[in-house]
Amino acid sequence: MNGLVLKKQADEFVVCLENGQNVVTKARKNLKKDGVFVGDHVVLDDENMISQIQHRKNLLVRPPLANVDRMFIVVAPVPKADLYTLDKLLIFCKLNNIEPILCVNKRDLDEKYCKEIEKIYKNLAKTIIFSTIDDSVLKIVPQIKGVCALAGQSAVGKSSIINAILGKNVAKIDTFSKKIERGKQTTRTVQLYNINRGNFLADTAGFSKLDEHLLNLDCRQAKNYFQEFLPFSSDCKYSSCQHIKDKDCGVAKAVEDGKISKERYSNYLKLYEILKNIKKY
Ligand SMILES: Nc1nc2c(ncn2[C@@H]2O[C@H](COP(=O)(O)OP(=O)(O)O)[C@@H](O)[C@H]2O)c(=O)[nH]1
Ligand SMILES: [Mg+2]
Ligand SMILES: [Zn+2]
C-alpha cells in the first residue's frame, strides 16, 4: 500500500494511506530511520511497515520536508516587503520545482501598497492572493494542492495564517521574545496536516538556509530566473550579455523605459554581484 509521511517522532511515522486513513508505523531497518522524511511517498509492506521510499522531487532543509508542490510566499505592507527576499524565494521555488503562490497579507493596512506589489509580480507567481487575518482561510485553502508550505520574512503573518487554517494554535504568533523562539528552533520538527482530499499543509512558517541553496547558482545563470528579461535580451548587442551594464543592453534599456520593474532589476544586479564574488569549492 502507498502512503505519505505526515509526521516523524523518534523512530515512528504517521503515514496517510491512499484511502485517507492514518497509520502509525516504523521503517524497515535497511531504510535507516534518518532516511525517511515528512512528505515522503512511501510503500508499506504486508506488515504495514515502510519498506520503500519513492523518488523525491525535492527535499527542503530546516525543517526537513520532502516533495513540496506549492509554496505560499507571504509578504505584507508592515513590515514592508523585502523584495530581494521575495525574488530569492521565487528563484528557490524554480530551482526546486515548486509552484510559488504570492500571498499579499495584511491588506487592511495599506491597500495601495498591495496594488504596487501586484503590479510588479502579477506574472511572476502562479497566483496572487490578497488576504487579511479574517479571510486568509477562505482565500488560501482553495489553493492548497499537494504538499504545501509557507515562507516569507518575519512578522508578515505566516503563523497567524497557519493557525487560522488549521483551526488551532500550532504555530507561535510573534508576541514571544526572540530568545524563546531561538531556543525552540533547535528542536523544530515539521508535520503535515491533511486539509482536504489529500492536500496537505506543513505547520511550519518558513525555512532557514534558503540562501545556501541559491549560492550554488552560477552568476551567469541568474538572469534566467528573471523571466521578464528574456523578451528584451534579443535587443542586447552581445548574445552573452549579462545585462549588468547599460551600454548596448536591451534589458537595461527596458528598465529605463519602464517596461521592466526597477526593483526587480536592482535585485538582479545585487544577486549577480553576490554570486560573482562567492568562492565555489
Ligand atoms: N493588521 C493585520 N495584522 C496581522 C494580520 N495577520 C497577522 N497580523 C499580525 O502580525 C503579527 C505577526 O504575525 P505572525 O503570524 O506571528 O507572523 P510570522 O512571523 O510571519 O509568523 C501578529 O501580531 C499578528 O496578529 C493581518 O492580516 N492584518
Ligand atoms: Mg511565525
Ligand atoms: Zn543585456
Image (tube, grey):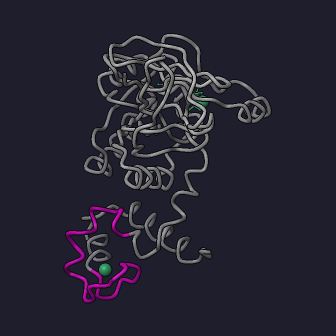
Q: Residue furthest front?
A: 46
Horizontal relation, residue 261 to residue 213: left or right: left
Q: Position of residue 132 (x, y in %)?
A: 42, 24
Closer-to-camera residue (80/189):
189
Residue 235 colored in magenta in the image: yes
In terms of secondary structure, what is the magenta stretch mainly?
loop
From the top left corner, tell me how far across and down residue 133 is, in percent.
46, 20
User: What residue lies at 37% left-to-right and 40% top-to-bottom?
Assistant: 102
Query: Is 152 in the magenta?
Result: no
Observer-nearest of 106 and 174: 174
Q: Quadrant of residue 280?
A: bottom right
Q: Would you identify the image quadrant in which residue 254 lies?
A: bottom left
Of the four image quadrants, the one with ligand 1 is top right
Position of 8 compared to 67: left or right? right
Q: Does residue 227 sit above or below 73 in this rendering?
A: below
Q: Is residue 172 left or right of residue 254?
A: right
Q: Which residues are magenta?
A: 223-249
| Quadrant containing the N terminus in the rendered view | top left
User: Residue 236: x, y in percent?
Assistant: 25, 83
Given residues 172 and 255, the one toward you in this image is 172
Q: Which residue is at a point 55% across and 32% down the rendered structure image?
A: 205
